[in-house]
Every structure is written in C-alpha cells, then in structure tokens.
Amino acid sequence: MPFPRKRNVLQFTEQEERKLESIRKSRTEEKRRTLRAAILLDSRSGRSDETIARHHHVSRGTEKCLQYGLDAALGELPRPGKPRQLPDDAIAWVMNCVCQKPKELGYTYELWTYKLLTAHVRRHCVAAGHPALQKLSRSKLHKILRQGELRPHKIRYYVQRRDPDFEPKMANVLHVYKEVEIVNEYRRGQAGRELGMVTISYDEKPGIQALAVTTPDRPPVVGQHPSHLRDYEYERLGTVSLLAGLDLHSGRIIETISDTHKSADFIAFLKKLYDAYADRQNIRLVLDNHSAHISKETRSYLNTVPQRFVFVFTPTHGSWLNLIENQFSKMTRTMLREIRVASKQELIDRIHQYYEEINADPVQFRWKYKMDEMSIV
C-alpha cells in the first residue's frame, strides 16, 4: 500500500464550512462542485488523501485548495490546450446575424432555428471575412448564444404604452382604489351604513366557447387510469360574452350574459346596475376604453339618468389595472377549465350558478401593489 502524501491539514472558518455543507447537499449545483465540497470536508478528518480519493472514486490531490484557496478548489483552473479557433470579430458577426430576423436576410422563417442559423453562418462567413466559421458546429453555436444571453428561437411579448396620458390615468385609477380601501376600513365599524357612492370594477369577457363532447367522458378508475378520459374531438356550439361588475365594497358580482358585447348589451348592464342600488347612491365604474363604453347610444342613455353614473377609464392597454380582471383570471383557471356542456344554454346557466356561489360567500378584491406609495389629493 502506498504511503499517504504528507500535506498541511486543511482548516476552514465556520462560514466556509457552512458554504461547503450547503454545496455538498445541494440538488441543483454541478456534480463536480458537490463532489469537491465533500472531498474538502472529508479532508478535515485527518484521513489520508488516498483514503478520501478511494472513497469518492477519484484521483487524489488537494494542493489546489492549499495554493489557491477554497473558491479555486471548487472551480476550474486554466488548463493548457488549443488556442481559440474563433476570434472576437467572428463571434460578434454571428451575434449580429442572430439579432436580425431570418426574413430580413431572405428566408421564409420568422424565427431562427439552430439548423437554419448554422447553415446561414457557414454559407456567408467567408464573404463576410470570417472563414474560421466554415466548420461551426451546433454545440459551438449554442455556446455563443448562451454567452451572449440570446434566444433567437423564442418571442417574449410586451405591451406598448400608446396612451400619452398613461401615468395620470393610472394614478387616477389607483387613487380610486385607495379611496375605496379607506372607505371600507371606516365602514367596518359602521355596519349597515349606506354608501353615498359605490365603486364597481367592470369589464367584458367575450368569446367564452360552448364546447360539447362527441362521446361521454370516462371517470378515473383505481389502478387503471388516474384521471378523466376524454375523446380529443369536440363540437362547437357557439360563444357567449360575459359582462360583469365587481362591487369593490362588498365583493359581490353583478353579471349579464349575451351573444355580443355591443352598446345595447352594455346599456342593459347599466340598467341592471341602476336597479341593484338605491336611487340616492351614485355608481362609479372603473372600466376600459372599449367603443361600447363611449358610443353615441351609451351617451344618450347616460343623459337620461344624469349624475347617476361616474366613469373612471383605465389607460389604453392598461386593462391589468382593472380588478375584475383578477376575477376573470380565477374563473378561467377554475370553473371554465376544460369545461364541456350539452348546449349553449347550459354554459349560460353554469356561469350564472358560478356567480351565485361566489355571491353567497363574497371576497373583497383589493389593489395592493405599491398602494402605500399613493396619496389622496
């Protein structure tokens, strides 16, 4: 048996030991880092390098820690090898190609694929003055893109602020929410007191599809299949539009369902709101800039009920500021998820039943994001 190599005993601070233990137990660290952390921790026990190496099935050696420190021992030191094959200007040219759409370079594709991008680089690199790229591999291209943090095969969406008055309109909406919060807090000690103005968050959810199955669903069976089974085919029975208003004081929801969401449908909803609240109460609606909300027909109806309704418009492309959107999102993720019905009327009835269940145990929706920074003026 060979003699153990003599070396200085490794010593770590408490902070370094905690770091090594964390790396050793990690389920997300690289395997080589967890292995090196375990070896370094075992080196404190006084066992020989030979014993530790045999235990971890590696070659022995801890000199890197002694010479360069803990971080170097966990990482990689520079190694001798071939010089770089791709100069910086060639890599910069590849990244410039990546930042253009394929259609801008004469292809039919909207986004790059690795195959198309590799072929393009190889085909045009010599003319661009970068012959070193003639043998560019997919793996090398992937490395270049990863280093440049580029993902040309994907798209991320954003919302352009097209409203020049976005900030003041947003502040106006948030001031309304702050006022509602203050009123609700005050009313907790004034049970039964009627509000002079109620605030409703309103929006439409159009295009809710009524889909029917072509064969009956099969329920789960213990030991055979854990979930419902459904034939992939379905029948379209039409769509409906949901018009709903969320009372920000009580959490109750008033809704109507129709085939469309035109001005006539919006006016019908306003009439339902009118009947739902006492005549002496004003009704303030937070709503978006849909054409039905500002149409000639809507303005004509509002003139017949002066001072009854107050509209607070969200900015253009700022529907996320409307609290009813949170309720619509919850509805989509729960009640409407994978829904199948036998008729369009069944879909309407189930939506009405859904809101009856919500109104039986209403929950107040509150705007919380950065609300503490708002002040009422």
Image (cartoon, grey):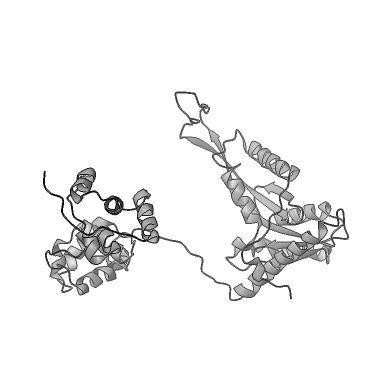
Q: Nearer the viewer, residue 375 or 319?
A: 375
Residue drawn 68% across the image and 47% down it: 257
Residue 23 vs residue 7, the one in the foreground: 7
Residue drawn at point x = 45 percent, y = 27 percent: 225
Assign the N terminus to one quadrant of the image: top left
Q: Position of residue 14 (x, y in %)?
A: 39, 59
Q: Is residue 262 visible?
A: no
Q: Quadrant of the C terminus?
A: bottom right
From the viewer's perspective, tell me whether residue 62 is left or right of residue 313.
left
**321, above or below 271, in the image:** below
Asked whether residue 4 appears in the rendered view, the answer is yes
Q: Residue at x 74, y 53 (%)?
A: 269
Residue 120 pos. (x, y %): 22, 63
Q: Quadrant of residue 298?
A: bottom right
Residue 194 picture quarter: bottom right
Give the left or right position of residue 8, taking residue 351 as reference.
left
Residue 96 image offset from top left, x and y in percent: 28, 71
Identify the residue at image location x=53%, y=32%: 213
- 61 horizontally vs 269: left or right: left
**Front-lying residue, 351 or 91:** 91
Q: How many marks?
A: 0
**Residue 237 x, y percent position in the rendering:** 57, 39
Q: In the rendered view, would you say 81 is above or below 43?
A: below
Asked if residue 42 lies left or right of residue 85, the reply is: right
